[in-house]
């Protein structure tokens, strides 16, 4: 899980649909190990509750998963990690945040916290 790769210093919300992987006891317990994480799920049959998460997972599937045949689970994990961490977070510009990357927005957020303190 992403939390093993970096520290969480501010509260965050994990948005998802009601897919079996997100409602599983193991996954929910993993989220509960960090008190700064709150899980958010859409209402049953209502994809508009988590439109951002729905959009992200649609992009992940159509841009990366459906176009690849992975040799094994590790290859799939690596490809998904690279898609998220390198492409989505560090290179893809988002119009909703003035054409910046999520990584840039995060850096600005933490820099503003340090300056305010």
Image (spheres, rainbow, N blue to C red):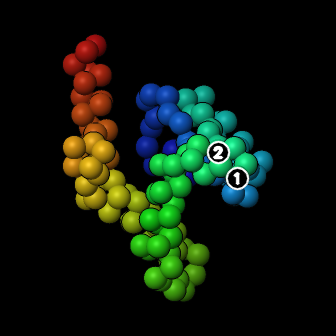
Q: Secondary structure at mark 2?
A: loop
Answer above or below: position of 106 versus 86.
Answer: above
Residue 116 visible in the picture = yes
Q: Which residue is mark 1?
A: 45
* Residue occupying the point 22% across, 43% down: 98
Residue drawn at x 67%, y 36% is 32
Q: Which residue is mark 2?
A: 42
Above/below status of 110 relative to 46: above
SS for tag 1?
A: loop
* Picture quadrant of residue 83: bottom left
Q: Let me know if residue 4 appears in the view.
A: no
Report the front residue among 71 and 99.
99
Label 2: few (<14), some (14–19) or many (≥20) C-alpha neighbours in 10 Å:
some
Residue 117 lies, in percent from the top left, at 28, 13
Tag count: 2
For the residue pair 66 and 107, the one nearer the viewer reads as 66
**Which residue appears at 69% of the width and 57% of the height?**
19
Residue 68 lies, in percent from the top left, at 47, 83
| Residue 4 position in % (x across, y down) | 51, 47
Left/right of residue 52 with respect to residue 113 in the rendered view? right
- Position of 110 with respect to 32 (left or right) is left
Q: Is residue 36 above or below residue 74?
A: above
Task: Name the residue at the right extreme.
Answer: 25
In the rendered structure, the answer to whether residue 115 lies left or right of residue 60 reads left
Q: Residue 103: give x, y in percent of width and height.
A: 29, 46
CA gap between label 1 and label 2 equals 8 Å
Q: Are marks 1 and 2 in contact (CB under 8 Å)?
A: no
| Mark number, residue 104 | none
Q: Nearer the viewer, residue 99 or 45?
A: 45
Mark 1 or 2, which is nearer the eye? Answer: 1
């Amino acid at each position: 899980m992403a939390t093993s790769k970096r520290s969480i210093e501010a509260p965050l919300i994990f948005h998802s649909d009601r897919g079996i992987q997100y409602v599983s006891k193991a996954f929910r317990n993993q989220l509960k190990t960090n008190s700064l994480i709150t899980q958010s799920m859409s209402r049953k049959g209502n994809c508009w509750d988590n439109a951002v998460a729905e959009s992200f997972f649609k992009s992940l599937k159509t841009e990366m998963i459906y176009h690849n045949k992975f040799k094994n689970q590790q290859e799939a994990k690596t490809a998904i990690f690279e898609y998220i961490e390198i492409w989505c977070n560090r290179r893809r510009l988002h119009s909703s945040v003035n054409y910046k990357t999520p990584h840039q927005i995060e850096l600005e957020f933490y820099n503003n916290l340090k300056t305010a303190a």
